[in-house]
Image (cartoon, helix red, strand yellow):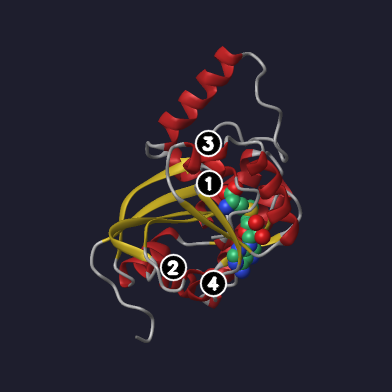
């Protein structure tokens, strides 16, 4: 859901999985289609790309359940997480999982300070306090200037548990490579790049470092049969 330019969908298809990718934005779908065209025929045959969005997934899938449902880098652009988790949880097969990548409040507070942008860090602290006082999620402006929303980790996992999704593991994404406002180019030396990815993977799986990553990637396992919302 929110497959974007197809980065994850194409990797999954290359690994042999059948993928139904749903994306509302026509420009993103065009980039996705172009990237898919470069893939071998058997990879292309494993991907179905559909127009659709959160709120109307059943209309796209016809109520099919999947071994895995991915929602990566999407929730921060939506007004609330709980209703989206409920909708998508209904599409996860018993024993399957949902993968969700979100910005956490911990991360949204830490990133401006780590970049030594003191005014932005103070503003983030003030917004964090205001959100807590008002009982709402923290808001922030992301790296490309788009307004976004951060999730409280505990509230997110509690909402998932209410939908029959149990937190199995989670990873921080971009722990040490995220100190600049926009992406620096990856190291051109393959050895350096491999080392960077190794370090990120190790830190991303370990407390306390994973808590400070740009994103939190949660693996939520469907522990029961679940039920269709309202059904
Ligand atoms: C940051 S991109 C992430 C793309 C992809 N999931 C990835 O990890 O590479 C966010 C995507 O969410 C999509 N999106 C925004 N609002 C959405 C909605 N209401 N329902 C589904 N997708 C949405 C955007 O069009 C965009 O493609």
Asked if disc 2 and disc 4 are in contact, CB closer than 8 Å, the reply is no
Q: Tell me the mark number nearer the camera, choosing from 2 and 4.
A: 2
Report if residue 91 is visible in the image. yes
Q: Which residue is mark 2?
A: 88
Q: Which residue is mark 3?
A: 175
Q: Which element type, helix, strand or loop, lies under badge 2?
A: helix
Q: CA distance from mark 2 to mark 4?
A: 13 Å
Callout 4 environment at 10 Å: few (<14), some (14 to 19), or many (20+)? some
Callout 2 environment at 10 Å: few (<14), some (14 to 19), or many (20+)? many
Asked if disc 3 and disc 4 are in contact, CB closer than 8 Å, the reply is no
> Residue at horizontal 59%, vertical 72%?
79
On screen, residue 30 versus residue 170, left or right, reads right
N-term mark: 2 or 3 = 2
Q: CA distance from mark 2 to mark 1?
A: 24 Å
Q: Which residue is mark 1?
A: 45
Q: Nearer the viewer, residue 121 or 83?
A: 83
Q: Which element type, helix, strand or loop, lies under badge 1?
A: helix
Q: Position of residue 31 (x, y in %)?
A: 72, 48
Q: Tell me the mark number nearer the camera, choosing from 1 and 3.
A: 1
**In the image, which disc is placed on residue 80?**
4
Ligand 1's quadrant: bottom right
Q: Position of residue 134 (x, y in %)?
A: 55, 77
On screen, residue 27 versus residue 167, left or right, reads right
Callout 3 environment at 10 Å: few (<14), some (14 to 19), or many (20+)? many
N-term mark: 2 or 4 = 4
- Assess mark 1: CB under 8 A from ligand 1? no
Q: Which element type, helix, strand or loop, lies under badge 4?
A: loop
Above-or-below relation of 174 to 29: above
Q: CA distance from mark 4 to mark 1?
A: 34 Å
């Amino acid at each position: 859901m929110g497959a974007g330019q197809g980065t994850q969908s194409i990797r999954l298809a290359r690994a042999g999985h059948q993928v139904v990718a749903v994306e509302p934005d026509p420009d993103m779908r065009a980039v996705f289609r172009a990237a898919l065209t470069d893939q071998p025929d058997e990879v292309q045959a494993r991907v179905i790309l559909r127009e659709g969005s959160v709120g109307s997934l059943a209309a796209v899938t016809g109520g099919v359940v999947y071994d895995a449902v991915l929602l990566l880098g999407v929730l921060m652009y939506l007004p609330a997480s709980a209703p989206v988790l409920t909708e998508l949880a209904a599409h996860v097969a018993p024993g399957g999982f949902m993968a969700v990548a979100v910005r956490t409040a911990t991360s949204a507070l830490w990133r401006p300070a780590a970049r030594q942008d003191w005014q932005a860090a103070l503003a983030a602290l003030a917004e964090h306090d205001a959100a807590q006082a008002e009982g709402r999620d923290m808001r922030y402006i992301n790296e490309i200037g788009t307004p976004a929303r951060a999730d409280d980790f505990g509230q997110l996992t509690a909402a998932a548990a209410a939908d029959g999704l149990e937190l199995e593991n989670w990873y921080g994404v971009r722990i040490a490579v995220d100190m600049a406002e926009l992406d620096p180019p990856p190291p051109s030396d393959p050895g350096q790049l491999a080392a960077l990815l190794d370090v990120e993977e190790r830190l991303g799986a370990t407390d306390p470092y994973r808590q400070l990553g740009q994103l939190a990637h949660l693996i939520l396992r469907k522990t029961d049969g679940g039920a269709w919302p309202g059904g």
